[in-house]
Amino acid sequence: MDTQHPSAPPRAQSRIARNGHPDRPPHAGGLVHDNTRHASRFTVVGNHLAQHAQLSLLAIGLGVHLQSLPNGARVDIKSLAARFPEGAARIAAALRELEAHGYLRRFRERVPGGRIVTRTVSCNQPSAARHRADEPVCAAPARPAAAPKKRAPRKPLPDVPGPAHPAPALIRAATDLLADLRRHDPRLLLSACDAAHLAPGVAAWLERDVGPEAVRHALTDDLPTEGLRRPAALLAHRLTARLPPLPAFQPPARHPLQTCEACDRAFRAPAPGRCRDCRCDPQGTDGERAP
């Protein structure tokens, strides 16, 4: 009763065609992936970076390279320019792009011995860095048989105002100001993530013509003597609650009216003298004839 079917395939057809590519419609163009699973030496990169709509191709490639490097690798502009064929100017521009979109944070820090170094933080998920919680900490068991306990994650920091024009130089100045606060009060030693969260708030103050010393005084004045458990949360509250108003518009000043000493014609100038038509000395006061 056994019936053979010579036309039936001996096993299921594979999705991979004989040419090594997945099945696709005939004459179809576009990209085809030929993937092999990595077992070692690989880096996971999010599509939000690899397919970023606003970053240049150089910035995307540099961001991927930075995420693949180990801690302690040298990523200053000189070292990167020696590693890649792009010049220092293009690499510096790509680093500024990554910094503006949150994939890179740079701040200066004083190390033992008094030397100031630049710390570079590569962030693989900028949207999550602002609300990242502390790593769980295991408490010591009271008895050998007791299970370890985990501390509850920290609450996210309050939101802070932001500048109307978040230029990279303005954000760097705000980050430097925050990093310097611990010199005025050791309790204000901030983590890199806390400084990145607070930097836009400080930049909003600087953008409103408030000097760095005035911002520092507003953040460090009259701090509580006890109970300062989360200095970053207190600074976030002060940056929001004490935000000064926008400066009033100041129209450009006009020179007063003067009377020409030669022809008695009225003209505008900062000091008395001759009008433009009567002035012979090219080094004299350059006035503006009044309408």
Image (cartoon, rainbow, N blue to C red):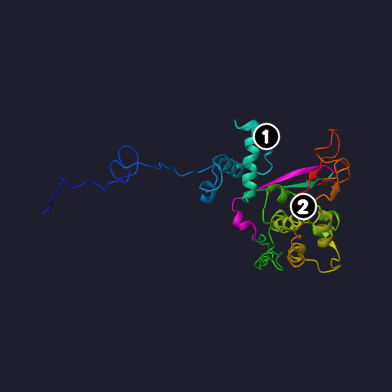
Residue stretch in magenta: 113-131
In this rendering, would 201 be left or right of 271? left
Amino acid marked by disc 2: Pro
Quadrant where the N terminus sits is: bottom left
Q: Please provide percent x and percent y for residue 208.
A: 75, 57
Foreground mark, 1 or 2, reads 2
Disc on res. 79 = 1
Residue 207 in the magenta stretch? The answer is no
Category of crowding for the residue at label 2, using alpha-carbon neighbours closer than 10 angstroms: few (below 14), some (14–19), many (at least 20):
few
Q: Please provide percent x and percent y for residue 280.
A: 84, 33
Residue hosting label 2: 252
Instruction: Give the structural element (helix, strand or loop) at label 2.
Output: loop
In this rendering, would 104 be left or right of 264? left
Disc on res. 177 = none
In this rendering, would 140 be left or right of 90? right
- Viewer-proximal residue among 256 and 194: 256
Give whichever of discs 1 and 2 has the lower sequence position. 1
Position of 61 relative to 223 (above/below): above
Q: Please provide percent x and percent y for residue 232.
A: 75, 62
Amino acid marked by disc 1: Ser
Q: Residue at x 68, y 49 (%)?
A: 167
Q: Residue at x 64, y 42 (%)?
A: 95
Q: Please provide percent x and percent y for residue 72.
A: 69, 42
Q: Residue furthest front?
A: 263
